[in-house]
Amino acid sequence: MSDDLRGRLVAVNGAELYYEDHGDGAPLVLIHGGLGSSSQWAPVVDELADGFRVITPDTRGHGHSTNPAGKLSYGAIADDVSALIAELGLQRPTVGGWSDGGQVALELGARHPPIASGLIVGAAYPDFDAGGLREAHRELLAADATGTPDPARMDAELGEFAEAIKALHPGGAERWPTLLRETAGMWLDYEGLSPGQVQAITTPVLVLAGDRDQFISLELAIRLYRALPNAELAICPLLTHEGPTPERAPIVASLIRDFAQRHSSQT
C-alpha cells in the first residue's frame, strides 16, 4: 500500500478492500454511495469518532479497492461487508449506508441477518421499478437500450461534479469508463428485494431520508419504513441525495448516534 493512504487493505472474497478505522467504542460500519468512496463519510466520521469505532470501507471497484471479478452487485458488496466484519473481528456492529450503501445495508439484513445489531438504510428503496430508480439510473448513466453507459455524455451533463467524483478514485479518468460499465450492470439489472424478503428483515432498521432527496421521495422512505417489521424513521431537513455534506453532517451524525447507541450490542 502506498504511503499516502491512511487506511489498510484486507483480502475479502477475491478482492482487496481498502478501509479506514477511526475512534474507539462500539463498532459502526458506514457504506458509501454509488460511484463514490469512503471519503464521502468524512464529515460524519468527524462527528462520531469520539464515541464509536467507525469503519468506512471503499466498496469493491471504488476508491482504493480492487474488483478482479469485473462486475458489481449489491449482493456481492453485502457479502464483502459481512466478510470484512468477520475479518476485523467485529461483534455485531451497527451497519449503515447511504444511497447504494443503503441498498447494501438492506441486502446485508436479508443475506446475513445475525451479523449486525442494527441497520441504517439511507436514501434507498428495494424495488427499483416501483420506485422509479431504474429509469433514473438509466438517465444518469446516459445509457442506451442495451444498458451501455455513455461516459462522454454523462461527463457533459454532470459538469464539474463528474470531475469531483473521478477524483475519488486513483487513476480517475482512466478508471471512469470501467466503473460506469460495472455500475450500470448493478443498477440496471438489480432484481431488488421482494416484499417477503423485506418483511423477513427483523434486525432493527433506521430508515434515514432527506427531505430534499431528488431520487428517494419521502413517500418511498415511509413505504419502506412501514414494510419493515422493526423500523424507525428519521428525516433530515435540507438533505439531498448528495448525502451528508459538511453542513448537514452534525444532524445526520446525531441521528446515527442515537440509533447506534440504543441498538449497539455493546450497550
Image (cartoon, grey):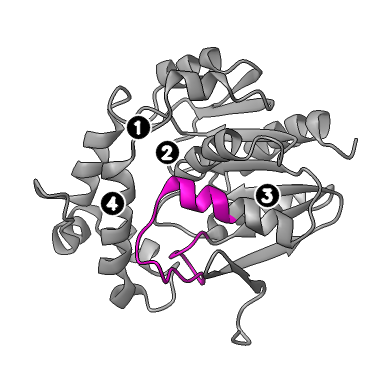
Q: Nearer the viewer, mark 4 or mark 3?
A: 4
Residue 256 in the figure: left or right of residue 236: right
Which one is earlier in the sequence, the residue at label 1 or at label 2?
1
Q: Nearer the viewer, mark 3 or mark 2?
A: 3
Q: Is residue 145 visible?
A: yes
Inter-mark Cα distance, 4 to 3: 25 Å
Quadrant placement of the C terminus: top right
Q: Which mark is residue 126?
A: none
Q: Residue furthest right?
A: 267
What residue did someone put label 1 on?
214
Residue 32 coordinates in the image, percent (x, y):
52, 51
Q: What is the three-letter code of the residue carrying label 1?
A: Gln
What residue did someone put label 4 on?
185
Q: Nearer the viewer, mark 3 or mark 1?
A: 3
What residue did someone put label 2 on?
241
Residue 48 coordinates in the image, percent (x, y):
75, 47
Q: Residues within 10 Å of mark 3 (few under 14, many from 20)?
A: many
Magenta run includes residue 16? no
Q: Which range is magenta?
A: 59-80
Circle 2 SS class:
loop
Q: What is the three-letter code of the residue carrying label 2?
A: His
Inter-mark Cα distance, 1 to 2: 6 Å
Which one is earlier in the sequence, the residue at label 4 or at label 3?
3
Inter-mark Cα distance, 2 to 4: 21 Å
Residue 7 in the figure: left or right of residue 188: right
Q: Residues within 10 Å of mark 2 (few under 14, many from 20)?
A: many
User: Are the residues flagged by discs 1 and 2 in contact, CB closer than 8 Å?
Assistant: yes
Q: Nearer the viewer, residue 81 or 258?
A: 81
